[in-house]
Image: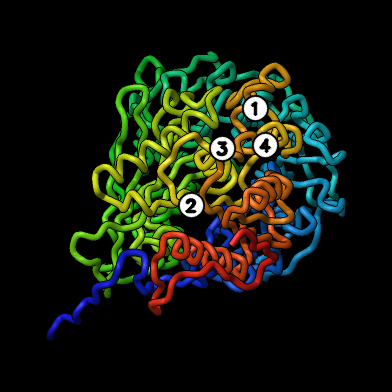
Amino acid sequence: MSTPTRRTLPPGSWPSPVAPVDLARSARLDDLTSVGRSLLFTRSDPASGEQRLHGWDAETGLVELGPHDVRSRVHEYGGGAVVTDTAGGGDGSVLVVDFADQRLHRVDAAGRSEPVTPETGARVRWAAGVTLPDRRVVAVRESHDGDTATEVRNELVLLDPRDGSQQVLVGDADFVTAPRVGPDGWLAWLAWDHPDMPWDGAALWAGRLEGDSLVDVRRVAGGDDVAVCELDWWRSDLVFTEDSTGWWELYHHDLGSGASTRLTEAEAELGGPRWVHGGDRMAVVGDAVVLVRTREAAADLVRVDLSRRPDGSVVGQLVEWPTATGQVQQLVRHAGAVATREVDPDGRRAVRLRGLDGSVVDVDDLPGPTTRAGDLGEIRPVTVGEGAETTHAFLHLPANADVTAPEGSRPPLVVFLHGGPTSHTPPVRTAAIAFWTTRGFAVADVNYRGSTGFGRAYRDAMRGRWGEIEVADVIAVATELGRRGLVDADRMAVRGGSAGGFTTLAVLTAPEHPFACGTSFFGVADLAALAEFTHKFESRYLDRMVGPLPETADVYRERSPLTHVDRLSVPLLVLQGLDDKVVPPEQSQVVVDAAREKGLLHDYLTFAGEGHGFRRPENVAAWHTAELGFYRSVMGIPDEEGEQGTSEADGAGRQHDGR
């Protein structure tokens, strides 16, 4: 059989199997939970973007449960929206957080639902609950007493789902998360206070529950510039990961003696930063601790087998556990195994049940953006700079099973900037990346200094330098890729959302940069305004990343893109959700106004009903249609029909000026 002839077309103009609507339909898997014989998790509905509760067990398979859009808004980022509940007499019911009202609702095994907590107009929100043997629940409660970040209380609460009664257990910390039920009434949890973020100085606490209060409360580890990120019980002791060595390593703590012992020397991140509730990356199964290990932003699984010496001390043996996955987003213990939420290198999303013997059961499996092997381009790790100036990126090269580029041509480049900025991107061919690479664009996914996944020193390199250090890194990576001839140095775009949007704007208003255009979605333009008006979780984040106010107000002004809009000289696309509480729309509007006053080519798309991130399928499709057309228009790249690209899109509020 003859092989079909591949067409030769200019990079950036290739017809792609990944359409904008495919990104809109890309499903999310979240909030994995084990209850009895069942695994529960949420899966997004492609038609609405809502997160629907699903259940699975080995006998009945996968079923959808209940009418709710299951999402928490605690910390605005949510997570931990599914809580196990046996208050119905062991009938397999669970508690879930409904996105609209933020109340807890009991959903039984047949999918029937009833509210458990009172109506508050979403001013009281719930997350990260665990069930006690007596059927009561310990959960995080976030109460909004006003409209500012200082009028929000985050507490660990004892809730009885049978009568709705609530009692505060921990109310003296700015933030609490990850309650864990231990033996003999013991409870453990994480807590931290401003100006720390959880990866700066989260402490592990433990106490014994007597009636409706905690006694014998003590700090076990962490705090004071040491961050605990994972915790669980092993028999009557605690195991946890903390980063006093510069890496999140595994420790054992004996409650009786109060002694902690380090069990690993992995020199890798065992666990990860707690941006959201839930999302645990450690689970104890018998005498084994299973952990997500991240090295240079790439993740796999490891197992640490625990044992006691004759003298009573505990030792751990790290066992390699090769897993063909690009990213493990969550681990939970289930039926003598571990259940995982994973993303494979080809973009496939899955919930899997992994036995300690190496067996794997696919619970739910969502295909990647394309199933054709010829559409999966090479991923090259890229390192730029030396010593303390080193930065990392993944270069995704273009690929298309039907098309090839003319000999000697170089692809246009789209630089992706992750949010956070204390986050990172793994070597995974997501739908968002394949959308570009299958059209002949190269994508550079930059893990600038300050990103997680490379140890504490790399993460802390951004302290006091946000808006400076990562700007230099992004410019350095793009410039070097152009210098090496891997991409077309004259056709490069930079894009990012939230903190990545801030860096996009900071790069485009730098004195010099190599980019032809850029896109900011819900990006920060004014750092002082962000510090004043953002939500509680991040309201003191900038103390670490920029400096405390008002002492460093001049630094905030100097680092803000708004201060330097006179330097903005290339076309700009701006996208914004009108219900965003993390980065309010005013942040985008000031940049758009400045671009208009300068007469620059720009587009501004607004999306009603969207918050910090776009979920509605029609909006996701409109966003990517507009972004693709914008780049093609600016870079002079013909589209699939041989026409010059345009930036027109339907379905969103928009301004379109300066043309």
| Mark seen at residue 556 | 1
Using the numbered discs, state the Cα–Cα distance from disc 3 to disc 2 in whole angstroms.
33 Å
Looking at the image, residue 170 lies above or below residue 498: above
| Dot label at residue 201 | none
> From this viewpoint, is residue 290 visible?
no
Identity, as a three-letter code, of the amino acid under mark 4? Asp
Question: Where's residue 42, x and y in %?
Answer: 58, 60
Spatial separation of the CA atoms under disc 4 and disc 1: 8 Å
In space, the residues marked 3 and 4 are separated at their CA atoms by 26 Å
For disc 2, the neighbor class at 10 Å (few under 14, some 14 to 19, many from 20) is many
Is residue 548 visible from the viewing direction of this image? yes
Q: Which mark is residue 526?
A: 4
Three-letter code, disc 3: Arg
- Pointer 4 local density, CA inside 10 Å: few below 14, some 14–19, many at least 20: many
Mark drawn on residue 274: 3
Residue 286 location in percent, x, y? 43, 40
The mark lying in front, picked from 3 and 4, is 4
Quadrant containing the C terminus in the rendered view: bottom right
Q: Residue at x 84, y 41 (%)?
A: 147
Of labels 1 and 3, the one closer to you: 1
Number of other residues with Cα within 10 Å of mark 1, as a class: few under 14, some 14 to 19, many 20 or more:
many
In this figure, which residue is indicated by the disc labeled 2? 517
* First in sequence: mark 1 vs mark 2: 2
Of mark 4 and mark 2, the one earlier in the sequence is 2
> Mark 2 falls on what kind of element?
strand
Q: Which element carries disc 4, helix, strand or loop?
A: loop
